[in-house]
Image: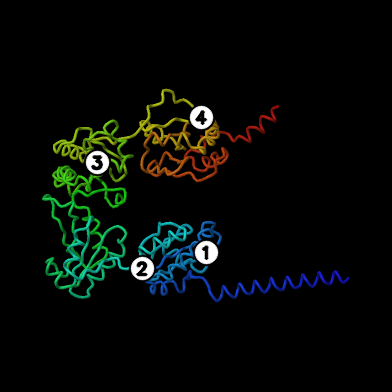
């Protein structure tokens, strides 16, 4: 009995200590709290306006990705709270008390992160999702987006930078200055901005109450102006449109970092672009591109690019890709590519651009040779027969994009072959596959991993549906049953057939 009493007493003491520990931890949580600010529909609009810069996570409590992000987000919030200037990290529960806020901000998945500045949505956050990466990315967003210049010497240095720059000259506080700063906040990651209110600086540059876009010295040419003066209204959207339309001039220097800022249709001259070791030679060829670009500036956009930085694009030029010649191609709105086969000269270049605009040039399509025998249950698609098979207006098509080295693709192959056998006698449904590493497909078939599958219904070839279902034969069959344009053409259900066969025995 004494031993039992002692054991019970010990157990009671342990439980008491454990309870105390939980209470202490709870107390510390209340005292120290979280540095992530949780907002709801009732206070989001008012609170977000008070924050100079905020990163907002729109989440769902049950979301696995959100749970993994949570400790990193907390750690980043603690660090950025002490930043100078501080950056607020906010979260909104999209299935709780923040439903309306999430809806208003176009949230369709979790977690979604967006950057707000003074209560205004700036951009979607697409940076790293671990603490150090979040801190690094948001610190770049903090601080002034436009450099204030107070003397003429500094302005000359600013204007002499490697890239183009938008400069605001303001004699006083005004709507134009306010909208200029808002534009700088919005485009700070893409372009350079500076402003001044110094009279001596404005006198030296010859501008007052104006916004001026300066071309970088390395791209100055007799074929175009070296600066562009903004003549629109005091409107952020108008200023940003001016920047986007003029930042690259007639012929911009495209790199992997700024490629997305070039509008299509885009004519690109690829050669050994090198503004460090050979600026004169680089501009020799750029000036020849400029001569032609002047005649088509309202119809097309132009750029020069280094072959070595766009090796994948060079595949379009076949054996010529390693030559010293200038290679020319066009990318249209749909993402199709057109290649100039002739050797570069101003005359050949001008004719190529004219022929492209007149629709006389066929797009380049990377393709393996057509299969000699394509009577198998799974049709082999290459670049040259894509239209014939996948875009057949009389057939629904389920196509797999694969890579020969992909393990998941190899695992799928026997199941996909079995699926093909099930539908081999169908008149309206095709099961197909294409090696996406050796063949081009239309841009609407976006392939970012392997295997990727698409459903191309016969009545809507322009908008194929990405297959997101299971990878068993039964999953594919159920999907096709649901999506088939002509259900009567479906093969008999395998299970029912088996039962019938067993009955016959």
Q: How much space separates mark 4 and mark 3, taking CA atoms? A: 46 Å
Kindly identify which residue carries mark 2: 117
Residue 64 percent across, percent down from the top left: 54, 57
Give the spatial CA distance, label 2 vs label 3.
Answer: 39 Å
Pick whichever, 333 or 211, lies toward us. 211
Q: Which marked residue is nearer to the observer: mark 3 or mark 1?
A: 3
Q: Earlier in the sequence, mark 2 or mark 4?
A: 2
Pointer 1: what residue? 95
| Label located before the other in sequence (2 or 1) | 1
Left or right: residue 293 versus residue 31 is left
Residue 150: give x, y in percent of width and height: 20, 71
Q: Few, some or many C-alpha atoms within 10 Å of disc 1 (few <14, some 14-19, many ≥20)?
A: some
Is residue 212 rendered to the left or right of residue 306? left
| First of labels 4, 3 by sequence position | 3
Q: CA distance from mark 2 to mark 4?
A: 58 Å
Q: Is residue 72 left or right of residue 224?
A: right
Q: Is residue 315 above or below residue 295?
A: above
Circle 3 crowding by C-alpha within 10 Å: few under 14, some 14–19, many from 20: many
Q: Circle 4 sits in a helix, a strand or a loop, which is it?
A: loop
Residue shown at 41% from the left, 57% from the top:
127
Quadrant housing the N terminus: bottom right
Q: Residue at x 49, y 42 (%)?
A: 483
At 20% from the left and 75% from the top, the residue drawn is: 172
| Cα separation between marks 3 and 1 | 50 Å
The numbered disc on residue 270 is 3
Residue 424, disc: 4
- Which marked residue is nearer to the observer: mark 2 or mark 1? 2
């Amino acid at each position: 009995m004494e031993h039992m009493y002692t054991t019970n007493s010990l157990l009671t003491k342990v439980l008491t200590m454990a309870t105390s520990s939980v209470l202490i931890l709870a107390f510390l949580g209340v005292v120290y709290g979280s540095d992530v600010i949780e907002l709801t529909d009732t206070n989001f609009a008012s609170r977000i306006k008070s924050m100079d810069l905020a990163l907002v996570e729109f989440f769902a409590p049950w979301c696995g990705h959100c749970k993994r992000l949570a400790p990193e987000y907390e750690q980043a919030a603690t660090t950025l709270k002490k930043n100078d200037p501080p950056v607020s990290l906010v979260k909104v529960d999209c299935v709780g008390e923040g439903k309306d806020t999430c809806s208003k901000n176009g949230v369709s998945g979790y977690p979604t992160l967006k950057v707000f500045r003074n209560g205004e949505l700036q951009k979607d956050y697409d940076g790293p999702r671990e603490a150090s990466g979040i801190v690094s990315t948001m610190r770049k967003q903090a601080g002034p987006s436009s450099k204030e210049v107070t003397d003429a010497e500094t302005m000359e240095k600013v204007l002499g930078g490697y890239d183009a720059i938008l400069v605001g000259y303001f004699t006083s506080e005004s709507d134009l200055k306010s909208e200029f700063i808002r534009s700088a906040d919005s485009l700070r990651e893409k372009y350079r901005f500076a402003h001044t209110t110094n009279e001596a600086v404005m006198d030296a540059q010859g501008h007052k109450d104006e916004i001026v876009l300066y071309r970088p010295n390395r791209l100055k040419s007799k074929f175009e102006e070296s600066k562009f003066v903004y003549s629109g209204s005091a409107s952020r959207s108008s200023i940003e449109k001016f920047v986007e339309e003029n930042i690259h001039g007639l012929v911009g220097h495209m790199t992997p970092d700024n490629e997305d800022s070039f509008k299509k249709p885009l004519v690109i001259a690829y050669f050994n672009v090198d503004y460090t070791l050979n600026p004169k030679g680089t501009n020799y060829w750029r000036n020849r591109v400029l001569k032609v670009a002047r005649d088509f500036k309202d119809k097309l956009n132009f750029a020069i690019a280094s072959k070595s930085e766009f090796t994948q694009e060079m595949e379009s030029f076949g054996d010529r890709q390693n030559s010293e010649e200038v290679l020319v191609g066009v990318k249209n709105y749909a993402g199709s590519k057109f290649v100039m086969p002739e050797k570069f000269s101003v005359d050949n270049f001008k004719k190529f651009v004219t022929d492209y605009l007149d629709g006389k040039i066929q797009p380049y399509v990377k393709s393996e040779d057509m299969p000699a025998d394509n009577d198998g249950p799974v049709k082999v698609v290459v670049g040259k027969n894509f239209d014939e098979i996948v875009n057949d207006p009389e057939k629904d098509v389920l196509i797999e994009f694969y890579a020969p080295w992909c393990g998941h693709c190899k695992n799928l192959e026997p199941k996909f072959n079995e699926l093909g056998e099930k539908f081999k006698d169908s008149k309206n449904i095709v099961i197909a596959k294409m090696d996406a590493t050796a063949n081009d497909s239309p841009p609407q078939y976006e392939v970012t991993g392997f295997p990727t599958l698409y459903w191309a219904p016969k009545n809507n070839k322009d908008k194929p549906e990405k297959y997101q279902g299971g990878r068993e034969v039964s999953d594919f069959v159920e999907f096709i049953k649901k999506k088939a344009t002509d259900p009567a053409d479906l093969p008999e259900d395998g299970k029912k057939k088996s039962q019938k066969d067993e009955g016959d025995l």
